[in-house]
Amino acid sequence: MAVVVKYVVERNGVERMTFTTKKEADAYDKMLDIAESLELMLEKVDVPLSEQQIESLALEIAKSKEDFMTILKGGKDPVVTKAPAKNKKADNVSAAQDNDEKKVS
C-alpha cells in the first residue's frame, strides 16, 4: 500500500483542484485570489457583462497575468498567435473543382 500526498485547493467549501505538490497548489490558489480580485474590479466597469462573463474573464486574465502585465506596461504582445493553417485538402478540392469547371465550359 502506498501513501500518496495530495494538495487540495478549496474555495467556499468547493474543491477546485487537486495537486501533487504544494508549490503547484499554492500557485493555483494565488491565481484564484487574483481572479477573485479582478471579479470585484470588473463588476464596477461600465460594460454590461453577466456574472458568468465576469467570472470567466477574470479567471482568464488571472491565468495569463504575465502577458497582461507586459502589455499594460507598454510592451508588445508576448504571444504571437498565427492564423490557422489552411487545410491543404480543401485547397486541392477547390483547385480540382476549378479545373472541372474549366473542362465543362
Image (spheres, rainbow, N blue to C red):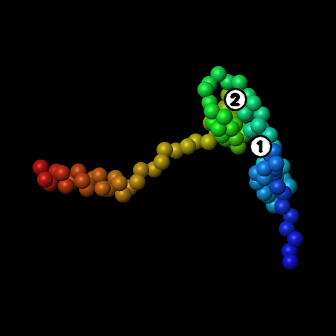
Q: Nearer the viewer, residue 81 or 36?
A: 36
Q: Identity of the amino acid at label 1?
A: Met
Q: Nearer the viewer, mark 1 or mark 2?
A: 2
Q: Quadrant of residue 2?
A: bottom right
Horizontal placement of 53 versus 26: left or right? Answer: left
Q: Which residue is mark 1?
A: 31
Q: Quadrant of residue 53?
A: top right
Q: Residues under labels 1 and 2: Cα distance?
A: 16 Å
Disc 2 crowd rating (10 Å Cα; few below 14, some 14-19, many 20+) is some
Q: Residue at x 75, y 30 (%)?
A: 40
Q: Residue furthest top?
A: 46
Label annotation for residue 43: none
Whether residue 61 is situated above or below residue 95 in the rendered picture: above
Q: Which residue is mark 2?
A: 42
**Residue 15, image x, y percentages:** 78, 52
Q: Residue at x 45, y 50 (%)?
A: 85
Q: Residue furthest bottom?
A: 1
Q: Secondary structure at mark 1?
A: helix
Whether residue 78 is situated above or below residue 24 in the rendered picture: above
**Residue 12, image x, y percentages:** 81, 45
| Quadrant for the N terminus in the image | bottom right
Residue 61 in sight from this viewpoint? no
Sequence-first tag of 1 and 2 = 1
Horizontal placement of 29 versus 61: left or right? Answer: right
Q: Identity of the amino acid at label 2?
A: Leu
**Residue 87, image x, y percentages:** 40, 54
Residue 59 in sight from this viewpoint? yes
**Residue 91, image x, y percentages:** 34, 52
Q: Nearer the viewer, residue 82 or 43?
A: 43
Q: Nearer the viewer, residue 11 or 26?
A: 11
